[in-house]
């Protein structure tokens, strides 16, 4: 695959897209971990939800 | 005319203020909403005035003008007086008389009714706390609205003005009006009590 | 499962958790295929190898507009039905949409340099996309600045709907004003004018990126629902007035 | 519609009496224009060429300065509650308030352009053209800015956040305002196309602004 | 400690509010300023607090800290509560404790004393009228100041809070403090009356 | 000094919470800069030449947008009464408030200049120079603007006639700020002369501002 005289532009754009998408994924994953950890914390400190189900139950 | 609410639930800032509240108010009879601070008296009045949406339950009006909502048939007297400090007493009142529409009474007589004639040409910003309250009360007189929603109406009033105001409420009730007032002190007229949130 | 059941946050949560792995897998596979095909695509006789940028530029550009569309529908849900799930959907979409818009801008200008000889030109298409980006940032700022989520949701909904006017402007800017930018060649009346060897990879990439968006959006919505539960619990702890002695 | 008339009269009267916003707006406008020659250096031709752009920028930024308390002031003193409860449709009340604001703050800006045109070395017809475009375009600035002012009440926020939300909406107005003025001055380009787009933008914002502001106020109830 | 004014004359907006007014307040004894609306009760309190300048006459303090002015030795509780809606209850109170200086009490105990503990982490903008008033009262407790100038302190308070507040005033007087309160209703503690402007 | 520290902390906290904080400041600045090419046209050389003026105008606008309620907000909710009565000298309290305002509204803008420099096609050293002039000059904008903010409390009525006198005070700051930046960018002109005048203006306003504001507040008692 020859990219011609503008290889750097092509590679940069693909790399940027990959980077930004990765950042999005990582950010969402970290966010998920953090929120669940804090919910667990609150639950173990005794603030039960009214429905009786765990607040962190996902299914 | 009869205003009633059933099973009202009120949320503010994501927190429940009250739930399962019922009330009835009929023409000619005042309702005094009482309860401790933070019980939800002001919130109830704002629900009735349509300034808050109930999370549950409903408010119904019988015998009103079919076209009009409760808000359009009501005067609301809140903590804040809706008067601009830069305008004179007369200018403020004339504005509300014109804006509220219908057939406004003469602002000068309304001002006289609450004993502010001597201050009619002063900017509203010059008034004392009680005088501002009286000016708000004068607003209730400019345009006839059958429902009066009053939030601690007698706060800051001196004893003479409290008597005058009791007279105004009595007149309003006698002419078929309806009064719902949140209050901590005595209202000055006989009223049915609506208690929110236990003993005060 | 009916739509109303789906709209129940708890139901939604369990459904999302069940389908997320499958979605992620499908996205990965399709992305791999798309990338392979774009690598194999021939050079354009005019643009040379730089045409490869198209395979990422165009999906990102489409998605930047599509995400705003999703947010607009969610905003209607917020204002008309006052449904909390609509708030969640709108809030979760904004950062993802901003990312796609950013990528459309960057890949576009990286393409513009070899093609037009400049990274940036103040023409109608590019400008309206930039405005879109600014509006995404404004919305994100709004969501972050206001703690009460339902209050923020209503304000954001009004703003989103007003901003939706920008979308047709972006779409048709190339037709209304003569600009440097290409007019539509894939999505236009009377069929595509693009060669198959470019069209197929492009469409595969577009579908892959759309799946990517759906995956990320579901995951972000799930986070947001949990965050609201967290807030509700904290609020519960902070309320309950005690009468004075 | 005496209710709307009363609202407009009141708002104008307050603006005139308190001074506040409108005056600062005009002053800021002046400051922007006075600053430009220092920034650009004494190149008169360049100044004249950029004149319309500078005037439009000044007008846009000045309107930002004065708009943010359009509804917040009424909210803080309780007037907004009564306006919401009244029999006047909220959309009309919002439109009346915006109109009053434009009369009190926008018109003085337009009236000031001839003076500023002198400073920017614009000739008579050019100044007139710019004033005309401002007359056609500033309502759009007010009526889109109004959305931000209503959001300020809903969000209980002010300051820069609003500017950030509102400015992107006003960019099209700026583009076509400047384009129309430049066309009028240069003479060769077509004036009527950008000018009619400008008028269209103003008309559209006259409709969208009040609805969006009213929706925001209504849903922001608390 | 003894605070007294002689021959005070007050002008506001170019109009005379009162003239030739004398008052005396001594430690351990509350003074209730009463009079009709617009008589000048608030104006008198602001004169004492140094927020208005008397057109004539003077105010003297005996037995205070020689260095300090009356304003610096006083707490002023006005109609406006000096709390920022965007900050939480605790943040607001902590700010005033730090800003007013001296050796501040723990904000949490002051909040508890007025029964706002459950709302300590809420933004002050979320409070009801009476809760805001209680928060202002908590401010009086953060830093010890011998002179309390109170403008209708019991407005918007429910009956229980009025009792609690009466207790706080009694404690303050017992510890050698001085209270001057403008009021229309009963203050809840024995007080000497200072009448301005005739019968109400 | 803990009283002043508390005041600064409080004001910054409110600014961050209500105005949205540094991020929004940056976003605002970005929007203003992005606005320019729409008005002035896409001529990059011209944009670079106007860059400093644009940045300075943005700074002025940002400070004006938030400055006008510096004291009015405290007056409206009664805080000002307590500040006046407190044991802290009023001049110091005023200075603390202005400092907090500058930290919350001015510093984020300065921090954002490198990003904006890129957009305006400025090179590294030039961007640094502009940031430096902003750092030296924006305190002057805040501390002269403060006088107007204090007058706004005093002159509840009768118009902001005196504010008319205050906004022009900021024009010298703008002029020397832009001149210093231009000198730094062009390289040939002398940078140090306008820059030291700018510093002198800032220092003078640091002294005059708090005294004038405090005097105005004290005499405005009512
Ligand atoms: C920063 C610069 C750019 C931006 C913001 C941008 C934005 C967009 C947007 C929003 C679309 C979708 C439009 C639609 O669906 O109708 C699009 C499509 C497209 N862009 Fe760009 N673009 C940029 C630069 C470029 C450059 C430099 C080229 C190539 C020379 C290019 C080629 C294309 C092509 C071929 C399409 C697909 C058009 C179609 O078939 O519908 N773009 N761009
Ligand atoms: N800011 C002001 N400017 C001019 N005049 C004022 C101002 N504030 C009050 N006044 C006038 O001063 C007089 C006394 O006002 P003051 O607020 O002291 O009355 P008050 O006794 O506290 O009344 P209230 O019982 O209603 O609180 C009033 O007639 C009022 O009109
Ligand atoms: N704007 C608001 N946002 C969030 N919560 C609020 C808001 N206003 C009031 N609340 C909360 O709602 C509850 C009820 O307030 P409301 O003002 O109705 O009480 P109230 O009965 O009128 O009290 P008071 O006797 O003190 O006037 C309070 O606990 C208060 O904290
Ligand atoms: Mg209440
Ligand atoms: Mg008083």
Image (cartoon, coloured by chain):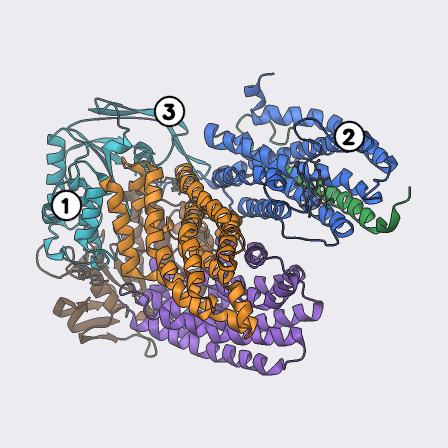
Chain colours: A green, B cyan, C blue, D orange, E brown, F purple
Label 3, residues with CA under 10 Å away: few <14, some 14-19, many ≥20: some
Nearer to us of marks 2 and 3 is 2
Q: Residue furthest front?
A: D188
Q: Secondary structure at mark 1?
A: helix
Q: CA distance from mark 2 to mark 1?
A: 78 Å
- Which chain does tag 3 point to? B
Task: Establish whether ligand 2 lies closer than 8 Å to the Cβ of label 1.
Answer: no
Residue C150 x %, y %: 49, 37
Judge from the rendering whether residue B106 lies leftward or rightward of residue F181; answer left or right: left
For label 1, the residue is B162
Residue F45 x %, y %: 65, 65
Residue at horizontal 10 percent and vertical 35 percent from the top: B171
For label 3, the residue is B57
Residue C10 x %, y %: 59, 26
Which of the two residues, D170 or C245, is positioned nearer the viewer here? D170
Same chain? Circles 2 and 3: no
For label 2, the residue is C204
| Quarter occupied by the N terminus of chain C | top right
């Amino acid at each position: 695959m020859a990219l011609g005289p503008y290889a750097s532009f092509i590679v940069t754009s693909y790399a940027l897209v990959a980077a930004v998408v990765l950042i999005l994924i990582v950010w969402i994953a970290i966010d998920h971990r953090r929120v669940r950890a804090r919910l667990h914390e609150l639950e173990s400190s005794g603030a039960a939800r009214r429905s009786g189900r765990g607040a962190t139950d996902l299914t | 005319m009869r205003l009633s609410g059933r099973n009202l639930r009120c949320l503010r800032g994501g927190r429940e203020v009250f739930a399962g509240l019922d009330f009835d108010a009929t023409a000619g009879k005042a309702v005094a909403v009482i309860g401790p601070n933070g019980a939800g008296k002001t919130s109830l009045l704002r629900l009735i005035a349509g300034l808050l949406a109930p999370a549950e339950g409903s408010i119904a009006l019988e015998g009103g003008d079919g076209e009009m909502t409760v808000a359009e048939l009501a005067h609301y007297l809140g903590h804040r007086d809706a008067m601009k400090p830069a305008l004179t007493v007369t200018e403020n009142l004339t504005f509300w008389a014109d804006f509220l529409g219908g057939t406004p009474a003469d602002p000068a007589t309304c001002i006289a009714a609450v004993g502010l004639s001597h201050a009619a040409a002063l900017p509203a910003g010059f008034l004392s706390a009680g005088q501002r309250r009286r000016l708000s009360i004068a607003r209730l007189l400019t345009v006839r609205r059958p429902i009066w929603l009053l939030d601690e109406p007698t706060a800051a009033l001196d004893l003479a003005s409290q008597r005058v105001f009791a007279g105004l409420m009595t007149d309003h009730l006698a002419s078929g009006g309806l009064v719902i007032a949140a209050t901590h002190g005595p209202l000055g007229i006989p009223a049915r009590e609506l208690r929110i949130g236990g003993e005060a | 499962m009916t739509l109303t059941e789906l709209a129940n946050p708890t139901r939604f949560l369990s459904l999302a958790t069940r389908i997320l792995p499958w979605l992620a897998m499908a996205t990965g596979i399709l992305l791999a295929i798309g990338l392979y095909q774009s690598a194999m695509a021939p050079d354009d006789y005019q643009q040379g190898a730089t045409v490869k940028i198209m395979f990422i530029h165009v999906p990102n550009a489409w998605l930047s507009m599509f995400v705003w569309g999703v947010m607009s529908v969610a905003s209607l849900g917020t204002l008309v039905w006052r449904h909390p799930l609509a708030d969640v959907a709108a809030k979760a979409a904004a950062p993802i949409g901003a990312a796609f818009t950013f990528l459309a801008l960057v890949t576009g200008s990286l393409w513009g340099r070899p093609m037009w000889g400049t990274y940036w030109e103040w023409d109608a298409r590019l400008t309206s996309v930039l405005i879109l980006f600014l509006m995404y940032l404004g919305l994100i700022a709004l969501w972050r600045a206001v703690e009460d989520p339902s209050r923020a949701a209503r304000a954001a909904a009004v703003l989103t709907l007003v901003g939706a006017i920008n979308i047709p402007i972006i779409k048709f800017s190339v037709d209304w004003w003569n600009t440097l930018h290409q007019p539509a060649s894939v999505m236009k009346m009377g069929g595509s004018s693009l060669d198959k060897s470019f069209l197929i990879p492009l469409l595969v990439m577009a579908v892959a990126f759309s799946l990517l968006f759906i995956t990320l959006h579901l995951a972000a919505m799930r986070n947001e629902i949990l965050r609201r539960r967290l807030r509700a619990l904290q609020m519960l702890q902070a309320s309950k007035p005690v009468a004075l002695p | 519609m005496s209710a709307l008339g009363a609202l407009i009269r009141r708002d104008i009267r307050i603006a005139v009496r308190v001074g506040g916003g409108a005056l600062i707006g005009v002053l800021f406008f002046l400051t922007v224009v006075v600053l430009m020659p220092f920034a650009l250096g004494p190149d008169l031709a360049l100044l004249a060429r950029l004149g319309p752009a500078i005037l439009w920028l000044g007008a846009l930024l000045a309107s930002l300065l004065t708009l943010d308390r359009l509804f917040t002031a009424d909210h803080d003193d309780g007037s907004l509650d009564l306006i919401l409860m009244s029999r006047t449709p909220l959309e009309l009340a919002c439109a009346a308030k915006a109109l009053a604001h434009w009369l009190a703050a926008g018109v003085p800006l337009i009236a000031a352009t001839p003076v500023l045109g002198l400073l920017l070395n614009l000739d008579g017809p050019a100044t007139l053209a710019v004033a005309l475009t401002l007359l056609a375009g500033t309502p759009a600035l007010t009526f889109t800015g109004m959305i931000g002012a209503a959001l300020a009440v809903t969000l209980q926020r002010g300051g820069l956040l609003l500017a950030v939300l509102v400015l992107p909406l006003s960019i099209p107005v700026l583009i076509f305002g400047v384009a129309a003025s430049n066309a009028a001055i240069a003479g060769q380009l077509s004036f009527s196309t950008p000018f009619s787009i400008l008028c269209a933008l103003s008309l559209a914002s006259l409709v969208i602004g009040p609805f969006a502001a009213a929706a925001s106020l209504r849903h922001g109830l608390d």
